[in-house]
Amino acid sequence: MIRRAVRFVGKRLGLLVILVACQLAHVLATTWMLFAILAGSDRAWTIAIGYDQLANATTGGNPDETISSRANRAWKENEVWGCVLCRLLGWLDKDHCSKSAGT
């Protein structure tokens, strides 16, 4: 019983350490992205794609896929959220979801 409790607490503490590391990585990525934008570096786009993949993973999608690619598949399957998101993204970048397929 005690061993089980120690394992339970140990896992939670490990996840808390990972959470703190993720928060530090977020601050670093945001700062780096800002400087990359100001400098005109392509790294800003790479960081943006990382955030896009994070958003997709957070909402239950494949962590290696962008939310735009997932929305493109949902749009093709006539899922409302995919149609709405692709339409919104299309205002920013024509045919964005179609161009993002498989990314």
Image: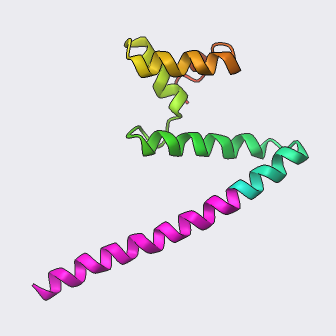
Specify the farthest residue to the right. 39
> Which residue sits at x=14%, y=88%?
2
| Vertical order, 43 against 83 (above or below) | below
**Quarter of the image with the N terminus in it:** bottom left
Place residue 9 in its image quadrant: bottom left
Q: Which residue is found at the position 52% from the left and 70% from the top?
A: 20
| Residue occupying the far left of the picture | 1
The residue drawn where x is 59% and y is 20% is 88
Asked whether residue 96 appears in the rendered view, the answer is: no
Q: Quadrant of the C terminus?
A: top right
Residue 95, image quadrant: top right
Outermost residue toward the bottom in this view:
2
Question: Can residue 95 be seen in the rendering of this structure?
Answer: yes
Residue 58 image offset from top left, x and y in percent? 44, 45
What percent of the width, then of the height, locates residue 51?
A: 59, 45
Q: Tell me residue 19's x, y (percent).
A: 48, 67
The magenta stretch is 1-29
Q: Is residue 48 above or below residue 26?
A: above
Residue 53, horizontal then vertical, whole percent: 53, 41
Is 24 on the left or on the right of 35, as rendered?
left
Asked if 17 appears above or below 64 in the picture, the reply is: below
Query: Does 31 lie within the magenta span?
Result: no
Q: Is residue 15 magenta?
A: yes
Q: Main secondary structure of the magenta part?
A: helix
